Structures are given as C-alpha cells and as structure tokens.
C-alpha cells in the first residue's frame, strides 16, 4: 500500500481536528500518532456510513471555521437512508478545458481546478434543451458538460442548429454511465472524446475520471483523483485485489481543508476492480439502490435489462425500467414497464420479445413468470430521446416502495 503515509495523515487530521469531534466520537480519542502503520491496520478501521453522519448534528461535523461555509448541498436521498446535507467551503467556479467554448449543465470544482484554462462557458438549462442548443450553436461550442441522459436528449436539438461532428469533448457525470449510453454517445457525437466523471454529493464533488490514457478494453474504467482514495470491498469487508472482482466502494478524502472529510465511507455504489499495469481502476456497476429489484420469486438486475434491450432493440439509445404493482384476483402482481429512448419505431411484439429475453433467475425469464401467473405482462413504449425526463436518470426504479 504505497499510499499509507498519505492515508495516515488524512486519518490523524480527521481524528484530531480542532473544530469537530465526529471521528473522535466514532473511533475514540486515544489513537496512537503513528496509526495506521500497516495495510492490516488501515483495513481494521471501521467503516463510516451515511447513518453515522445523519445521526450527528451538522455543527458537530464541520471541520473548518464556520465562516468558511458558503453553501450547503443536499443529496437526492437515492441511497434509501435519508437526505444528507453537506456543508461546502468553496464557490463553484466557471471552468472549461483549455481553449474550449463549452456548454455546461453543471460545473466541477476539482476538474476545472486541475484541467482548467478555458475562458468561455455557457450555462445550459436542462429544462429547455432547445434554447440551450440554439445558444450553443450561436456561440460555436465545441465541448459539453452534462449527464449522459441529457447529452443523448440534447443531440436531437443540437443537430437542428449545428454539426455534431464539431463537438470534440464530452465531460459526463451525475449518473451511472451505461454501456448502452456509451455506444449511443459515440454514434451521436462521432468526433468527441468521452470523459467520464464519477461524482458524489457526499464527497462534495468528483471522485474519479477517465484516465488520460484509457485502459485497453475498458472504456468506462475510472481513475481516482489525487485527493481521493478509493477502495473496493467484498461482502465480508475485505479489500478486493483481483482484476474483474466486484464489490462495494469505500471513499477516503485526502483534502487538508475539507469541510467534512470521509474516512472509509460506505457510499453504497458497486464497482468492478480493473487492474492494468499494476495500477487499480474501477468501473461503476450500479449506483445505490439501483442494483437489484426483487419481483416475486425472481430478481431484476440493471445489467440484465441492458443486455435484453441491446439484443431486442439495436437502435436503442437509452432506457428506463419501472416496477409497479397491479391488482389481480388473488394478489397484487409485479408489473415491469420499459421506456426505450430511440429514433426508431418498435414493433407491437417488442414487449413480448423483451419478456422472453429478460432473465429473472438462472432458469427463468420474465415471460415464464407471466405464464405462471406471477407477473403482469411487460409493457414497452418507444419515445424520442428529446423527451427524456428532466431529472437524474435511474435505469431501474421500484415504485412499489
């Protein structure tokens, strides 16, 4: 563990902070100044959870003088453990890639600080993509910052006013990047370099980005930023070390003046560890509460839905799946509805084809469950990408809870 000295420094600063007793209360005040000295000692540090933070009044978890707080940002609550408000100590700057004319639907402090240089930024309005596209075309933008689902919807508007081949840079975050979205964006913006940004409101900003030299065979691989330490752990809480292994992410922030430093924080997202040239990267598999949804005797997984959509609707650019319940003679039945964002029309039997393609267990498909009276028939519709919902995209939503 080559980062042990840096991690020890971050841990000791969190413990002995003069403004907050959060970690002293959590771990105890009697911590040796040389701890941790080994990888085993680091791994012995208990995880921090959102529940721990929510149980602590905000004034007890501010690690800087109160006058440095200039805003408070709240998470969406998608982790299922309540809305968490985190104080922030820096203004959100306008920034861009050097020499770029950029349309931005949000601004990244860390990214713009380390890669900034541009002087011309246009703030886009996610609620009015047509006007945003017109202004972008008039300004001759060549770069865009937005969530993947917004970029897919925006393409239809932009193409009316400019050549999409002129877009050379896409900086994407705010939601999980899927393989389906990746393929769609490469088709829609053929000249653009795709840079993924993994963000977390809990950590007050970006955590990892696409490395300068992409990992061969892994276009969605992410490299942690210098001020973040990222671990993947298995179900027993042990760090993953094998290429291709999957587990939960832990975050540790290494910023000296962070308002709320995180130490081995369980963010709830799942990832796949990628090892290349003895260096660790990771791919996001699912965001918190977007992994699996139980339906009757089976379970729906995002990656299984994506596989089926890619197989049945080759022209799909993105999708959203919603599980609800409908009344039946005996008991309520789970019902799966899938909205496919595409420029193409779909046949009347697309829903039936998807039902036969979506596995809910190793031996059973959704269609088997319908035939056995366990599920309501699958409903499918196709809509233009321009009608994408004006919110963060979640690809698998359980509306029964």
Image: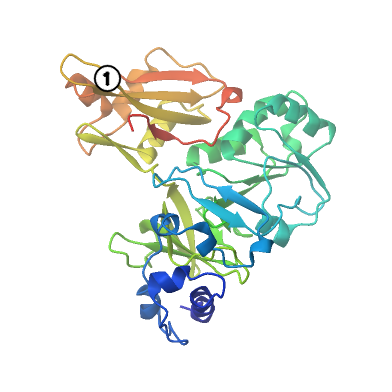
Snapshot quadrant of residue 155:
top right
Q: Is residue 28 visible?
A: yes
Of 37 and 312, nearer the camera is 37
Of 280 and 248, nearer the camera is 248
Q: Is 392 drawn above or below residue 68 in the view shown? A: above
Q: Is 19 drawn above or below residue 337 in the view shown? A: below
- Indicate left or right for 196 with 352 as reference: right
- Indicate left or right for 317 with 28 as reference: right
Residue that label 1 marks: 376
Where is residue 65? Give x, y as percent. Answer: 64, 67
Give me the residue at 49% from left, 50% from top: 84
Where is residue 227? Give x, y as percent. Answer: 59, 67
Q: How many labels were placed on the picture?
A: 1
Of 50 and 56, nearer the camera is 56
Q: Is 278 drawn above or below residue 315 in the view shown? A: below
Quadrant that contains the N terminus: bottom left
Secondary structure beneath dot 1 equals loop
Give me the residue at 60% from left, 51% from top: 72
Where is residue 233? Give x, y as percent. Answer: 36, 62
Where is residue 230? Give x, y as percent. Answer: 48, 64
- Indicate left or right for 313 with 94 as reference: left
């Amino acid at each position: 563990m080559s980062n042990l000295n840096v991690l020890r420094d971050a841990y000791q600063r969190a413990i002995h902070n003069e403004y907050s007793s959060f970690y002293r209360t959590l771990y105890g005040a009697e911590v040796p100044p040389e701890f941790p000295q080994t990888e085993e000692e680091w791994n012995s540090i208990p995880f921090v959870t959102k529940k721990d933070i929510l149980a602590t009044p905000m004034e007890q978890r501010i690690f800087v003088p109160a006058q440095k707080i200039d805003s408070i940002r709240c998470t969406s609550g998608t982790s299922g453990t309540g809305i968490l408000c985190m104080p922030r100590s820096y203004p959100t700057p306008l920034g861009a890639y050097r020499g770029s004319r950029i349309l931005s639907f949000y601004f990244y402090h860390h990214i713009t600080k380390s890669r900034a240089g541009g002087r011309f930024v246009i703030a886009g309005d996610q609620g009015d993509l047509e006007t945003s596209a017109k202004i972008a075309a008039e300004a001759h933008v060549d770069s865009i910052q937005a969530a993947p689902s917004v970029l897919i919807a925006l393409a239809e508007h932009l193409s009316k006013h400019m050549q999409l081949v002129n877009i050379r840079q896409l900086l994407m975050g705010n939601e999980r990047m899927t393989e389906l979205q990746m393929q769609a964006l490469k088709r829609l913006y053929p000249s653009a370099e795709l840079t993924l940004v993994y963000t977390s409101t809990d950590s007050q900003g970006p955590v990892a980005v696409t490395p300068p030299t992409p990992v061969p065979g892994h276009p969605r691989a992410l490299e942690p930023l210098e001020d973040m330490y990222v671990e993947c752990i298995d179900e027993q809480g042990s760090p993953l070390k094998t290429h291709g292994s999957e587990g939960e992410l832990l975050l540790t922030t290494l910023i000296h003046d962070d308002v709320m430093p995180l130490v081995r924080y369980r963010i709830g997202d799942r990832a796949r560890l990628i090892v290349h040239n003895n260096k660790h990267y990771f791919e996001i598999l699912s965001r918190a509460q977007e992994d699996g949804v139980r339906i009757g005797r089976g379970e729906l997984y995002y990656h299984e839905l994506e596989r089926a959509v890619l197989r049945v609707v080759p022209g799909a650019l993105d999708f959203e799946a919603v599980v609800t319940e409908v009344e039946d003679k005996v008991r309520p039945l789970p019902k799966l509805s899938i909205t496919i964002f595409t420029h193409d029309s779909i046949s009347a039997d697309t829903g039936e084809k998807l039902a036969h393609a979506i596995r809910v267990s190793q031996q059973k498909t959704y269609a088997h469950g319908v035939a056995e009276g366990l599920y309501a028939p699958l409903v499918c519709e196709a809509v233009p990408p321009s009608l994408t919902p004006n919110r963060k995209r979640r690809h698998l939503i359980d509306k029964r809870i």
